Image (cartoon, coloured by chain):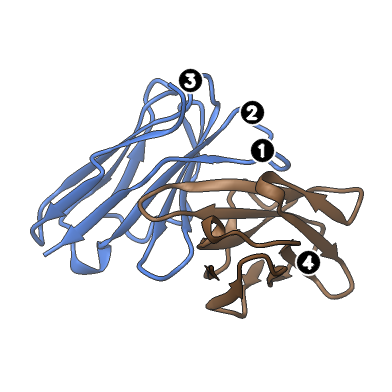
């Protein structure tokens, strides 16, 4: 069965510093990987996705993610964090030919301090 | 509409009561998903529709849960005889195309169900 792990419940960084939110996956085939962000009382908002091609994917709000097949990871990164980036981040995987649903990780709360 | 709309935003139900949660997907979106998000956890898949056809309901936790999308647009998730463990946020998402492997889904704000 496919699964996604986000090993950190919470990440704290200072504004202006780079941030990384970790995600690892476990699938038996080629994964399609997604990052979503959830602000309080808001629905999930799509940030970026990896389908194929370049391992470095750029998305919304200056976020990017690096797909590493050997390490089965898809870490979310941003060179310079903003206080407004504080939110709950979810990594998700969809396995080719295994249904259309997304399997989500448990989420990581990002706190950016001024 | 501009986005996926869900109603009500909040629902308090007494244990044993039936509830119905509504989802209005983005106009023209073929695929529609329901997810359940328990407090402090990631969303978990419940069911999937392609137009009016329910193609996957493997995530529905019990036969008390029922979903429909009779005209391929609005969907309703019904929970019969609610129990406390049903308390969660129920998220609806839609995608434009039927082949959704490489397309992102757009989520609504969710309905927070509290069973007391």
What percent of the width, then of the height, locates residue B47? Answer: 46, 47
Circle 2 or circle 4, nearest the eye: 2
Distance, label 3 to label 2, CA atoms, is: 12 Å
Q: Is disc 2 in contact with disc 1, using a CB cutoff of under 8 Å?
A: yes
Q: Is disc 4 in contact with disc 3, using a CB cutoff of under 8 Å?
A: no
* Disc 3 packing (10 Å; few <14; some 14–19; many ≥20): some
Q: Mark 4 lies on which chain?
A: A
Q: Is mark 3 on a helix, strand or loop?
A: loop
Q: How many labels does the image show?
A: 4
Residue that carries the numbered disc 2 in the rendered image: B97
Residue that carries the numbered disc 4 in the rendered image: A28
Q: What element carries label 2?
A: loop
Toward the viewer: A114 or A2?
A114
Q: Is mark 1 on a helix, strand or loop?
A: loop
Q: Which chain carries label 3?
A: B
Distance, label 4 to label 3, CA atoms, is: 35 Å
The quarter of the picture where residue B76 lies is top left
Circle 1 or circle 3, nearest the eye: 3
Labels 3 and 2 positioned on one and the same chain: yes
Residue at 37%, 27% in the rendered image: B74
Residue at 57%, 76% in the rendered image: A12
* Disc 2 packing (10 Å; few <14; some 14–19; many ≥20): some
* Disc 4 packing (10 Å; few <14; some 14–19; many ≥20): few
What percent of the width, then of the height, locates residue A29? Answer: 81, 61
Q: Mark 2 lies on which chain?
A: B
Q: Colour of chain B?
A: blue
Distance, label 2 to label 4, CA atoms, is: 25 Å
Labels 2 and 4 positioned on one and the same chain: no
Q: Which mark is residue B100?
A: 1
């Amino acid at each position: 069965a496919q699964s996604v792990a986000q090993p950190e419940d919470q990440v704290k960084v200072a504004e202006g510093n780079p941030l990384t939110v970790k995600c690892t996956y476990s699938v038996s085939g080629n994964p399609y990987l997604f990052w979503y962000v959830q602000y309080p009382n808001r629905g999930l908002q799509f940030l970026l996705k990896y389908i194929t091609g370049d391992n470095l994917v750029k998305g919304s709000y200056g976020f990017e993610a690096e797909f590493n097949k050997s390490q089965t990871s898809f870490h979310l990164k941003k060179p310079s964090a903003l206080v407004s980036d504080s939110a709950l981040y979810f990594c998700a995987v969809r396995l080719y030919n295994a249904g259309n649903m997304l399997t989500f990780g448990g989420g990581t709360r990002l706190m950016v301090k001024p | 509409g501009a986005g996926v709309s869900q109603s009500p935003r909040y629902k308090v139900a007494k244990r044993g009561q039936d509830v119905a949660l509504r989802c209005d997907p983005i106009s023209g979106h073929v695929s529609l998903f329901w997810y359940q998000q328990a407090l402090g956890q990631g969303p978990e898949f419940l069911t999937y529709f392609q137009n009016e056809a329910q193609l996957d309901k493997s995530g529905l936790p019990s036969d008390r849960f029922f979903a429909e999308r009779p005209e391929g647009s609005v969907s309703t998730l019904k929970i019969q005889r609610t129990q406390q463990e049903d308390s969660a946020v129920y998220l609806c998402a839609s995608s434009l195309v039927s082949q959704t492997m490489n397309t992102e889904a757009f989520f609504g704000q969710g309905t927070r169900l509290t069973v007391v």
